[in-house]
Amino acid sequence: MEFAAGGRLEVRITPADVGKRVSVRRLSDALISGEKFTDTVGVLASWNDGVVLITRRDGETVRIAEGSLVAGKVVPAAPARRRGPAASYEELARVSARAWRPVESERVGDWELRAAAGFTRRANSVLPLGDPGRPLDEALAYVREWYAARGLPPYVQTATGAEGTQELLCAALAEHGWKREVSAELHIGGLAPVADLDADTDRVTLSRTFDEPWLRRYKRFGVPGPHVREVLAGGPSVWFASVPGSGDAPAAIGRCVVDGRWAGFMAVEVAPEHRREGLATAVMTALSRQALAEGASAAWLQVEDDNDGARALYDGMGFAAHHAYHHYRYGPA
C-alpha cells in the first residue's frame, strides 16, 4: 500500500477528515502478530483524546492510538458495483423496509421505531435514515424506553460499505454501549436474467396468500401468531411461491414483494431432503417472471454472512453485494 512518493510514510489526515474514507497504517504489536505494521481502510468516525476510530466496511469499529499512526491518507470512496442496477443506500433501505413491515411503528425525527412482537430483528429495530431531531443521547434513551415498554430488546439497524451509509452512527453506537450482534448483506441484480433461467417452474404455485403448510416450511418463529402473519402479508404487492412436497409442508417456498422497479426476495427455503434439485432456482425464476409482468426490472435480497450456499446460488444468478447491514443491541445478550 503506497502512502507517499519515494516510500516515505506520512500521516496526511487530521480530525477535520472525520466522515471521510481513509487508509491508515499503524504500528502492530509485533510480539502477537509478527508483523511490524497493520493497515486499516474505512470511514474515519472520530478522533478524540488521542484515539482514532475507523469503521470498516464490515461494520467493525477499530480503535487506534494516535501515537501508533505512521501513515494515513484520504482515499476515494469504494467504486460502485458494476453488476446490477444503480441504486442508493437510502432507496434500498426504504424499499426493503416496505417489504417487511412491522405491526407497530413510530417516527422520531427521521428515525422509524418498529415493533412486531419480536418476530425478526428487521421488524423490531430502529431504521435511522437521517436526523432523529434531538441529541443522540436523548434519542437512544427514548429508543430504549420505547422497546422496554413493549418487552423487547432495543435494536438499531445500520448499514456500511456504500455511499450514504452509517459508519459514523455505528461508531457512535459502540461508544454508547451498543454491541453489534448480527450482520448480513443486501445484494442487488437485474431481474430479467433470473426470469430467463432454464428452471422447472411448472412445479411452482404462486399465490397472494400463504397457508399453514407454507408456514411449516418457513420455521423462522416459535408460535405463528397474528404478528407473524401480519408481517409476512404486508407490502406493496406480495407473492408467495410453493413447491408441493410429500409430507405436511412444501418441498420449497419463497416470498417476493414487488415495489415499483424493485422486486425483493425473501423466505426462500428448501426442505433438506430436496436440496440440489433446482427448487430454489425454480422458485426464484417463477417469482421473477411474475415481478417482470408487474413492471419491475431490478431485484434485491438479503444474505446472512454464514450462508455460503445462498451466496453461491445468488452469485450465479448475477447478484452482487451493495452494502452490509447490522443490528446493534443495547444491554446484555
Image (spheres, rainbow, N blue to C red):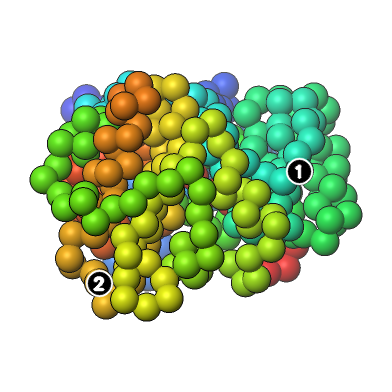
- Looking at the image, which residue is at 70% across and 57% down? 226
Rendered residue at 27%/44% (across/down): 286
From the image, state whether disc 2 or disc 1 is nearer to you: 2
Residue 321 shows in the view: no
Residue at mark 1: 104
Q: In this view, does 126 lie above or below 119?
A: above
In the displayed structure, does residue 109 sit left or right of residue 3? right
Q: Position of residue 155 (x, y in %)?
A: 68, 51
Q: Does residue 332 lie above or below 92 as drawn?
A: below
Q: Where is residue 22 in the image (x, y as percent from the top left)?
A: 41, 31
The residue to which callout 2 is attached is 274
Mark 2 nearby-residue class (10 Å; few <14, some 14–19, many ≥20): few
Does residue 108 sit above or below 314 in this rendering?
Answer: above
Label 1 residue SS: strand
Q: Earlier in the sequence, mark 2 or mark 1?
A: 1
Q: Mark 1 belongs to which amino acid?
A: Glu
Mark 1 closeness class: few <14, some 14–19, many ≥20 residues within 10 Å: few
**SS of the residue at dot 2?**
helix
* Image mark count: 2
